[in-house]
Amino acid sequence: MKLMKKTGLIASVVLVSGILIHAVSDEKIGDKAPVTKGYFFPAEIDFAGEKTPLNIIDVKERLDRELLVNANLDASTLLIIKRANRFFPVIEPILKKNGVPDDFKYLAVAESALMNATSSAGAKGFWQFMADTAKERGMEVNDGVDERYHLEKSTEAACKYLLDAYKKFGSWTLAAASYNGGFGGVNKQITIQGVTNYYDLLLTDETARYVFRILALKQIMKNPVQYGFDIAPAELYQAIPTRKLEIDSSITDLASFAKSQGINYKILKIHNPWLRDRKLANPTKKKYVIEIPTAGY
């Protein structure tokens, strides 16, 4: 989310992707050009119901680039597909409740690969919020609690941003682009260039690729077999059942607290990554909900 950060994750993928593009398109093995595995280019595609104009040559080629790259990031894309089985059921109902199109779950994939990632600029979580922006969007961020790591709360905050962006731009595609390029950055280019469609705008390389990466991830994840990812259901990461424990007091020692709940400190932190310290200071008696897994350990 460039509004919030310089996206470290995307930048690293671009670097690796460039190497892969060279390997796929230029490198030869003996006298034969390599065969790209499981590749399929769709006749049409849309983002949040907004059709991508594949009749425009540069649009078609930019999507082709991202499909080739992500279809050939074998381990990374495979892990994303496995994680989606666990985390999409958490994200999807929050998007729906807020009136945000389901396709925005793929924006979270593009931002973090469905991990609580940290960018080089300090953006954190599935939705890659910077600390100040997270606070502006209603999340608690301090040394003890960082709700950027709370999937439900950070998804709610992302919805607030996206709804504001849609209200401003009147386009879900531009709302997605602004998540990377910022309100101001995208609006400035709309004003300068005199166009109001993402696919007509000349943007920075990162933002120009951003929506196409989301589209490519959507296409691959909805049609994994076509792209060489034939995954048995048993290989997908399953949701882990938990019970929810409401706390309105301080916890002086989270390790001892974890043991009192029948788990250990590691398991507690895995399921509650928003707890950032060894204790939970709560002088105002705020209500927190801690998840305690009931299986899988």
Image (cartoon, rainbow, N blue to C red):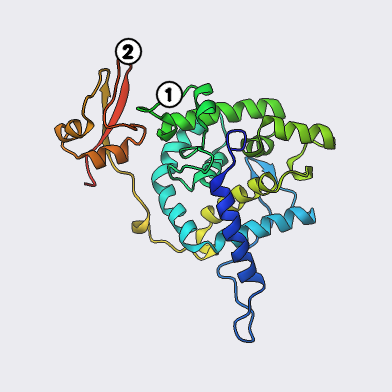
Residue 140's label in the rendered image is 1
Q: Please say if 154 is above or below 119.
A: above
**Image location (x, y in percent) of residue 53:** 75, 49
**Image location (x, y in percent) of residue 204:** 72, 45
**Image location (x, y in percent) of residue 55:** 78, 54
Q: Nearer the viewer, residue 225 or 294?
A: 294
**Secondary structure of the residue carrying numbered label 2:** loop
Q: Is residue 29 visible?
A: yes
Name the residue that disc number 2 marks: 284
Q: CA distance from mark 2 to mark 1?
A: 13 Å
Q: Please say if 292 is above or below 232.
A: above
| Labels 2 and 1 touching (C-beta < 8 A) | no
Could you tell me which residue is drawn at 22 percent across and 25 percent down?
252
**Image location (x, y in percent) of residue 82:** 41, 53
Could you tell me which residue is drawn at 22 percent across and 43 percent down?
295
Q: Is residue 268 left or right of residue 46?
A: left
Q: Is residue 170 visible?
A: no
Q: Nearer the viewer, residue 285 or 240?
A: 285
- Within 10 Å of disc 1 (Cα), the crowding (few <14, some 14-19, many 20+) is some
Q: Is residue 264 left or right of residue 63?
A: left
**Secondary structure of the residue carrying numbered label 1:** loop
Residue 123's label in the rendered image is none
- Which residue is most to the top? 284
Could you tell me which residue is drawn at 62 percent across and 70 percent down?
24
Quadrant occupied by the N terminus = top right
Q: For the residue marked with disc 2, what is the amino acid?
A: Thr
Q: Nearer the viewer, residue 155 or 101?
A: 155
Q: Nearer the viewer, residue 278 or 259?
A: 278
Could you tell me which residue is drawn at 41 percent across and 49 percent down?
83
- Within 10 Å of disc 2 (Cα), the crowding (few <14, some 14-19, many 20+) is few
Q: Please say if 22 is above or below 52.
A: below
